[in-house]
């Protein structure tokens, strides 16, 4: 499993909510992509994660 | 016509200000907020980045922005290919709830020049996906028309390389983009001082986007105000219509009737004839 470009250990039964808790990321004001599915932080589903999933967790920062 | 009633309309949304601002490079969020206030801007760009998983709890920029007051314009800065840009645009929409995107496809790190082919390709995909697309581009009239036909809401030609502060170095090429443009033309990147912004607006640009010139000014808030005035001056001048340039001087005062002293080198043909001594 890849999380923000880094390998991340997968364990059976892992869900997206559990992953965010594990990473200590509050879902508000972020966005999450699991492969090609894009979720606003406030509406992240508690979907099961697979070992081959690619997950991106992003936020807004200053930029031009 | 007053500037007040001369609205900028992008994709059906109207704005009084023709100055868009980036939010990068500011020393802190308080300065940034004061800058946005002083500039009068209504359209604010932001970037999308991965959350640093080692340092959670970061105060997000979104908390500092009044989203009722500003049209948020997330960008795809840092994306090197069309595919990356489309992905970041979708993440931006998920993160902000906003479907406006400043499209940047920039494979070149030294000059930060956009890839025209990748930009057009990503623009088509994003328009199909319901985005309001504002593409950053080289000032190329053929590409500008293609982006318009693809359904982009504006085109955003560069004045000079991003963050360089070198001013409007692409003026002649900008003219070709402005000529016959069917969407607003926003000059983006490279403006260094308010006179650069005024120059772009005088040439007929519909708006400008500024970040580094304000963020790196000694007094960013004062510079934001100065840019606002520069944009207004340039826009008013464009609407007023400039004079035609001349090859030679043309006196503003009447040439006839100037009181003159007698010229000792020239015979005075108008007065009485002098007899030689």
Image (spheres, rainbow, N blue to C red):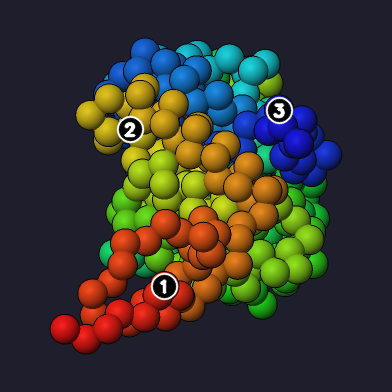
Task: Give left or right: position of B40 versus B10.
Answer: left
Q: Residues within 10 Å of mark 1 (few under 14, many from 20)?
A: few
Q: Which residue is mark 2?
A: B215
Task: Give residue B256's position: percent from left, percent from top.
Answer: 53, 64
Dot 3 or dot 2: first in sequence order is 3
Instruction: Name the residue nearer the viewer: B67 or B207.
Output: B207
**Disc 2 from disc 1: Cα separation:** 69 Å
Image quadrant in which you'd find residue B57 = top left
Question: Numbered disc 3: what chain?
Answer: B
Q: Is there a contact, CB below 8 Å, between mark 2 and mark 1?
A: no
Position of B139 compared to B32: left or right? right
What secondary structure is found at the residue carrying circle 2? helix
Of B93 and B158, nearer the camera is B158
Q: Mark 1 to mark 3: distance in Å?
A: 60 Å
Residue at mark 1: B271
| Residue B276, picture quadrant | bottom left
Crowd around label 3: few <14 · some 14–19 · many ≥20 (10 Å) = few
- SS at badge 1: loop
Question: In this rendering, which labeled residue sits more in front, label 1 or label 3?
Answer: 1
- Who's the residue at 76% across and 36% down the image? B1
B277 vs B84, nearest the viewer: B277
Q: Decide if residue B237 is in sight here.
A: yes
Q: Position of residue B18 (x, y in %)?
A: 61, 38
Question: Which numbered circle lies on residue B4?
Answer: 3
Question: Which label sits on residue B50?
Answer: none
- Disc 2: host chain: B
Q: Please tell me which residue is depicted at 69% across the width and 48% down the height of the picture.
A: B239
């Amino acid at each position: 499993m890849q999380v923000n470009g880094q390998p991340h250990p997968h364990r059976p039964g892992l869900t997206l909510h559990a992953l965010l808790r594990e990473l200590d990321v509050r879902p508000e004001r972020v966005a999450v992509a699991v492969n090609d599915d894009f979720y606003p932080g406030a509406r992240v589903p508690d979907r099961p994660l697979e070992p081959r999933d690619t997950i991106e967790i992003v936020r807004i920062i200053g930029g031009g | 016509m007053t500037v007040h009633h001369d609205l900028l309309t992008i994709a059906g949304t109207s704005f009084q200000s023709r100055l868009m601002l980036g939010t990068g490079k500011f020393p802190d969020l308080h300065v940034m907020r004061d800058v946005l206030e002083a500039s009068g801007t209504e359209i604010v760009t932001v970037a999308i980045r991965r959350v640093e998983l080692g340092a959670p709890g970061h105060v997000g920029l979104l908390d500092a922005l009044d989203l009722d007051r500003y049209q948020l314009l997330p960008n795809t800065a840092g994306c090197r290919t069309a595919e990356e840009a489309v992905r970041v645009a979708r993440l931006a929409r998920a993160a902000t709830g906003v479907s406006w995107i400043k499209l940047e496809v920039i494979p070149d790190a030294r000059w930060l020049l956009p890839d025209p082919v990748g930009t057009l390709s990503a623009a088509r995909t994003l328009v199909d996906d319901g985005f309001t697309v504002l593409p950053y581009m080289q000032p190329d009239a053929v590409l500008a028309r293609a982006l318009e036909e693809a359904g982009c809401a504006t085109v955003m030609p560069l004045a000079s390389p991003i963050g360089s502060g070198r001013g409007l170095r692409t003026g002649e090429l900008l003219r070709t983009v402005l000529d016959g443009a069917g969407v607003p033309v926003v000059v983006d990147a490279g403006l260094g001082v308010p006179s650069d912004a005024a120059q772009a607006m005088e040439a007929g640009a519909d708006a400008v986007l500024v970040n580094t010139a304000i963020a790196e000014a000694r007094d960013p808030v004062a510079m934001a105000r100065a840019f606002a005035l520069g944009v207004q001056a340039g826009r008013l001048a464009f609407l007023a219509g400039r004079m035609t340039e001349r090859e030679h001087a043309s006196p503003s005062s009447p040439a006839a009737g100037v009181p003159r002293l007698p010229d000792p080198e020239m015979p005075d043909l108008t007065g009485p004839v002098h007899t030689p001594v």
